[in-house]
Image (cartoon, helix red, strand yellow):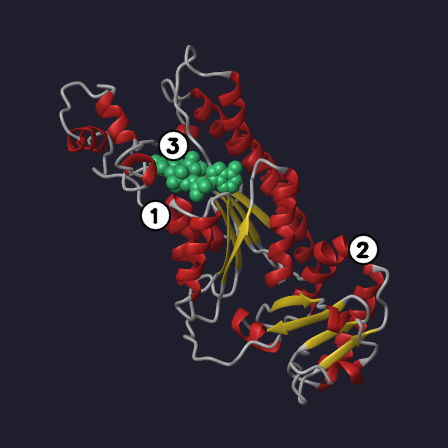
Amino acid sequence: MSNLITSLVIPAIRMLTSREKIMTVRLDNREEILSVENEEDLRKLNFIKKSAGILVVDETTDPEEILEDLEVKLCAWFDSRIVHPDYLFLKGVGVVAIAENAYLLDVLLGAPLVEVKEISGRVQDKIVIVTGGAQGFGGGIAELLYAQGANVVIADLNEEAGVKITTALNATMQTNKAFFVKANVSDPESVEAMIAATVNYFGGLDVIISNAGILRAGGLDEMSPEVFSLMTDVNYKGYFLCAKYAAAIMKVQARFRENYYTDIIQINSKSGLKGSNRNFAYAGGKFGGIGLTQSFAMELMPHRIKVNSVCPGNFFEGPLWSDPEKGLFVQYLKAGKVPGAKTIEDVKAFYEAQVPAGRGCRVIDVVRAIFYIIEQEYETGQAVPVTGGQNMLN
Ligand SMILES: NC(=O)c1ccc[n+]([C@@H]2O[C@H](COP(=O)([O-])OP(=O)(O)OC[C@H]3O[C@@H](n4cnc5c(N)ncnc54)[C@H](O)[C@@H]3O)[C@@H](O)[C@H]2O)c1
């Protein structure tokens, strides 16, 4: 039952209580709420204001019947009022708070009123998961989407870096919020829990950016079966798992709201479009990712879930290339991979010269592709190159 509350009832409530604007909702099932018997007692709880609008749902055992009861009651509610209820009370399950944004949601659940910045961004109040969001491309994508108003879930194995970036984002005091979840994208239980944590915290899921990825280069002589499996698990299976558990929530949202579009976006690579010498474990997984994107797109478009990949060129300014100790520039310099190169700058210049645009890919380049994908309703199943002209589609 609690699984169905998260995977069905909460995302449905988010859609059913929304009129023009899509709401942010959260289930609160603290002990003191679970023991409440009726609306009168609920109103005695100290965080509930006297003027709060409460709608009581009578059916609380069968999730489909909860929703039927709710649909009828919400119709009656909106017949006589313009504003949505502040809380839905489901006896023995908890209270679902409903608000225009994540800050107001916190206030409804007892947080103090503080001064916040109201912005009106391109992805205002959308709920977005970024896997591998603690650093690199993922960290930059999370920052830019947050700056444009998204409620961002940063999901990463690296808890320290993930909490750091989440705290920094929330310190900007916008009405949208960031939230960290420790997750391993190659583990089904962990991905399922990541999606559940997102739904429980913000009420649904609008965009998942499957970005977490690893690279261990090596030719056939060096590549061990174990490393090959690890890379395939993170880069290929991880994308499948994200799509599987995200789509389940997105389908519910499509069922309860007409014309509502959501997005599954994989951060692929130019190595998903063209083979990569002595880097087949990476390129193979990325090529496979495009096969998944095309196939998921066909399956999910009837649910208005668009599925696309973004294929960035090399992110020379990110840690993978520029880390002073482990970065690829240092490694390639030491290995003498670039003939005649004496410094890191020489190695960098060699790689930059291969890009018609004359520079590496940056986070903003990738985010512009993400905006295109999200804003476009008439496209799915694509691999959008962002390579400065280094890879051109046939
Ligand atoms: N760096 C590039 O030049 C480049 C170019 C094209 C595409 N990409 C792709 O962009 C994505 C991000 O790459 P990056 O260079 O920013 O990487 P990065 O190594 O800087 O960051 C990756 C993040 O993913 C996290 N992560 C790793 N394994 C994970 C797992 N199993 N579960 C959850 N989190 C995990 C790491 O902790 C890290 O925070 C990858 O999919 C990569 O293939 C990178």
Q: Quadrant of residue 388?
A: top left
Q: Which residue is mark 3?
A: 270
Which image quarter: residue 108?
bottom right
Question: In this orientation, which residue lies closer to the viewer: 386 or 54?
Answer: 54
Q: Amino acid at mark 1?
A: Val
According to the picture, the residue beneath numbered tag 1 turns out to be: 363
User: Is 232 on the left-hand or right-hand side of 44?
Assistant: left
Q: Pointer 1: residues within 10 angstroms few (<14), some, or many (20+)?
A: many
Q: Which mark is residue 1?
A: 2
Taking the image as drawn, is residue 385 in sight?
no
Q: Position of residue 50 (x, y in %)?
A: 68, 89
Q: Position of residue 144 (x, y in %)?
A: 38, 56
Q: Quadrant of ligand 1?
A: top left
**Residue at 68% over, 68% down:** 28
- Say if disc 3 is inside 8 Å of ligand 1: yes
Q: CA distance from mark 1 to mark 3?
A: 15 Å
The structure residue drawn at horizontal position 66% and vertical position 72%, both measured from the top left corner, is 97
Sequence-first disc among 1 and 2: 2
Name the quadrant of the C terminus: top left
Counting residues from the start of the chain, the first of labels 3 and 2 encountered is: 2
Q: Where is residue 370 drawn, in percent x and y?
A: 43, 49
Q: Would you call the spot at circle 2 few (<14 residues within 10 Å), some (14-19), or many (20 or more)? A: few
- Point out residue 356 in the picture as x, y percentages from the top left corner: 23, 35
Residue type at the position of mark 2: Met
Question: Three-letter amino acid code at disc 3?
Answer: Lys
Instruction: Kindly state the secondary structure of the residue where label 2 is placed.
Output: loop
